[in-house]
Amino acid sequence: MSEPWEDEGPGEIKKFLYVNRKSPYGTIYALESLEVVLIAAAFEQDVSMVFMDDGVYQIKKGQDTQQIGMKNFSPTYRALEGYDVEKLYVEAESLAERGLSEDDLLVPVEVMSRDAIARLMDEQDVILSF
Amino acid sequence: MLHTVNKSPFERNTLASCLGHALPDSAILLIEDGVLAAVQGTAREAEMRKALETYSVSVLGPDLLARGLSPDQVIPGIDVVDYGGFVELTENHDKVQAWL
Amino acid sequence: MPIEVNGKSYETDEEGYLANLSDWNEDLANAMAQADGAELDSNHWEVINFLREYYDEYQIAPAVRVLTKAIGKKLGPDKGNSKYLYELFPYGPAKQACKYAGLPKPTGCV
């Protein structure tokens, strides 16, 4: 009998990409995506996250939700590294359209062109869209 | 890869974002409010005709009919499919990206 | 079901997790442990305090795998392993320790 602390092997590792395109508090998508990523991290797959369109606002520094009465979940993006989710990509065009730069983001990311993001999507085994 | 688009191009940037990220051999399926992009005579027609040069584009018939639009009004070159066609498209592609 | 400590009543959810994070105090943690037939020593407190700091920083309760790794980083490999943590918290280190720390149940725990 296996004990709960004995890890099972990860089996076949697949490439999962989470595509985040929505601003954080207007809809539930951003939080749902983050929760799914954290839960699925237990399955030890090859996980990447991309932030594009309004999704770049999910990782904008300085979020303060006190006055809208919602939980500020932006600090949780900084926990992703501890969950071995380290491949975070941001689309350069999406940042530029919104007057943002890499310095405005609260986690280390790799900024990529739209073309590179398109190829990244093509390389995946599974894409989950939010 | 199959891309689905389910938002109106008049309300959201969903279709634009899809077209900006789909690689040349991709298929695009318009569903729900996304079907509004498939109709002739709209401000999006030129964009869709251009997309047809690069992608194979389909539109879900039941969603057209539900919105009072007929398959006759669809831009030539866009394939009108039923739910069976939707299933077939997902089967024929290795993965699906749902643009929401 | 509310929990009574020092004449005060604290709201919890149906699994005994504290409803309001800000209600937490050490006596409450001890009372929760007692109700489970456990007594908290300095080793337990080390983990409980670690969890509270983790939550404060990241706004989530860590998954057990993440907790184990982070404890190992901070307190050394003797403590950063599942066996040690399960001995301290036999109902599951993330689940049970989070409860005593006044945190919600870790995301993904069923």
Image (cartoon, rainbow, N blue to C red):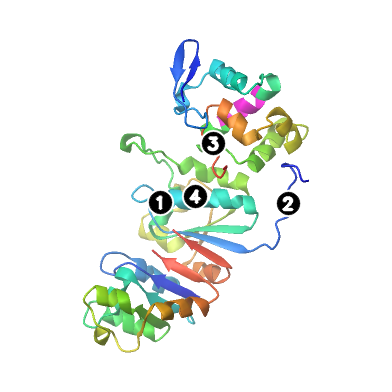
C56 on left or right of A71: right
Q: Main secondary structure of the magenta part?
A: helix
Helix or strand or loop: what does disc 2 sit on?
Answer: loop
Parent chain of label 1: A
Asked where in the image residue B28 lies, by quadrant, the reply is bottom left
Between residues B95 and A95, which one lies in front from this camera angle? B95
Task: Tell me the tag on residue A9.
Answer: none
Q: Are marks 2 and 1 in contact (CB under 8 Å)?
A: no
Q: Residues within 10 Å of mark 4 (few under 14, many from 20)?
A: many
Q: Mark 1 — residue?
A: A57
The magenta segment: C45-53
Disc 4 with disc 2 on a shared chain: yes
Task: Estimate the spatial distance between the alpha carbons at disc 2 and disc 3, rounded to whole Å.
Answer: 23 Å
Q: Mark 4 — residue?
A: A34
Task: Estimate the spatial distance between the alpha carbons at disc 3 and disc 4, rounded to whole Å.
Answer: 16 Å
Q: Quadrant of the C terminus of chain B?
A: bottom left
Q: Mark 3 — residue?
A: C105
Between residues A98 and A7, which one lies in front from this camera angle? A7
Q: Position of residue C98 (x, y in %)?
A: 58, 31
Specify the amino acid type for callout 2: Glu
Specify the amino acid type for callout 4: Leu
Helix or strand or loop: what does disc 4 sit on?
Answer: helix
Q: Mark 2 — residue?
A: A8
Q: Residues within 10 Å of mark 2 (few under 14, many from 20)?
A: few
Parent chain of label 4: A
